[in-house]
Amino acid sequence: MKIIGSIGKKFIKASDDIGNAFLMLVKTVYSYISYKQDRKNIINQMIQIGVMSVPVTALTSVFTGMVLALQTAYSTRNIFNEPIYIGSVVGFSMVKELGPVLTAIVVAGRVGAAIAAELGTMKVTEQIDALYTLGTNPIKYLAVPRFISIVVMLPILTVFADIIGIIGGFFVSVYKLGIAATVYKNDILDYMRVEDLFHGLIKSVFFALIIVTVACYKGFNCEGGAEGVGRATTQTVVISMVMILVSDYFLTALLVLFGIG
Amino acid sequence: MIRIVDLHKSFGENNVLSGVNLEIKDRETITIIGGSGCGKSVLIKHIVGLLKPASGNIFVDETEITGLNEKSLSEVQRNFGFLFQGAALFDSLTVGDNVAFGLRNLTEMPAEKISQKVKKCLSMIGLEGIEQMKPSELSGGMKKRVALARAIATDPKYIFYDEPTTGIDPIMADVINDLIIYLQKSLDITSIVVTHDMTSAYKISNRIAMLYDGKIIGIGTPDEIKKTENQYVKQFTTGSSVGPIKMKVRER
């Protein structure tokens, strides 16, 4: 009976958290629509969230593109006796799956953790309460700029990751495997459509919403001093990553159903 | 005037406030004393609208605030200044921006006037010329004084002090006490102080109220509190471990 009670309690707590996080997202969107935004703050956040994530995103995607090219070459060589369709495999994989997912995971680890830690520290040091007493809604002042920045910057970073990944695959194909540059290029251009790019971009917008909602919710509801901040940060990264991977499957199924990519 | 009527609040199974009744008169300094974790901070956070009670009413200048929506509550909150226990300065902003924060968000004051007001507030608390410093560069006492400058910048009618002398040395604590008295007299405001520092309470208060077991169990002027026959208040104010208030040395 105790186990059932414990499971029930956890289920109620999880449902409560999901409901409250969604409510916070609705309030954030409402604040974005209703109030004039602080451009300086948003640009600052865009630099922190987007521009500062460029090196790690580039590093991740270039090696992903390179290893994809290598693996495809070995696999196709085993089956067809020669490395073929490398451009198509790298292109499709990067644009539809690995670009959006890997970029979102990198951003969840780098930016989501930073948001949760910053807001969590503000919560436990009463800075969020201080905002209220100074006539400022924390959702408007803290969540909205981060929301806008991440929703705008994650798709841009995803496109950047797609391009860098394809370039990585190009270098391996041309300089290691000896495939002609035009063959690699034509493999991509002949088979890929604009919808494939949209497929990845739509997913990246959803991933951005997941990261910012989880990070802000965990930060705003952080309790228990330094330990609580650490817990909120870890939970943000773990929950975001799991939600990104789980939702990726359902989003892919849904987008294919609607004929997008 | 602030009037608190039968206020109740609990966190889970822990009843923190169980029927608080208190009236705070205009232009007085009232100190709420009580042991650590008895609900003093929770009480003042209810008055400024940071927490919602389970039941009961809070009237600020005859406006009942517990049922107000966010917008109406924010209008009432314009009358409040709050000094947090840990100062709660915004780490990412300079001292000047911290003090100017409320002015930029609550008023239509032009930048030039805000800058003058920031200088004036910092001068009132004896810290001129530190506008460009970051909170991380300040000592604990300086942080509290900057937080006080931030709290008075918007010319509030009521100032709430949450443990203003906790965590700082006795001399700096007395400087803060003098500042509270000076601000109360020079700005003609109502001060609500939460503390367990009896030296501070006796020095700054017009009245002292003791919170125990979720209720106000004694209230009076510092002299009346010193002479009280209430054994709970007497034990707390004299700082004795012997009396009706039992503190456990060990949990088991």
Image (cartoon, rainbow, N blue to C red):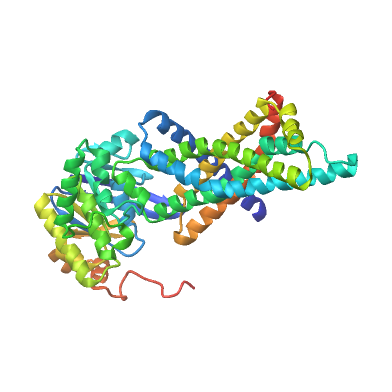
Name the foreground residue: B31 vs A25: A25
The answer to whether residue B131 is above or below residue B74 is: below
Q: Is residue B17 left or right of residue B236?
A: right
Q: Is residue A54 left or right of residue A139?
A: right
Residue at 9% x, 54% y: name it: B185
Q: Position of residue A137 (x, y in %)?
A: 36, 40
The answer to whether residue B141 is above or below residue A62 is: below
How many labels sit on residues? 0
Question: Residue A204: which quarter of the image?
Answer: top right
Q: Is residue A72 left or right of residue B46?
A: right
Residue at 69% x, 46% y: name it: A64
In this orientation, does residue B49 appear? Answer: no
Q: Position of residue B101 (x, y in %)?
A: 27, 45
Name the foreground residue: B28 vs B117: B117
Looking at the rendering, in which quadrant would you find the C terminus of chain A? top right
Name the foreground residue: A153 vs B224: A153
The answer to whether residue B136 is above or below residue A56 is: below
Tell which residue pokes out farthest to the left in this image. Answer: B186
In this orientation, does residue B122 appear? Answer: yes
Name the foreground residue: B92 vs A238: B92
Q: Position of residue A207 (x, y in %)?
A: 58, 39
Residue at 15% x, 65% y: name it: B203
Q: Is residue A50 left or right of residue A190?
A: left
Q: Position of residue A217 (x, y in %)?
A: 49, 45
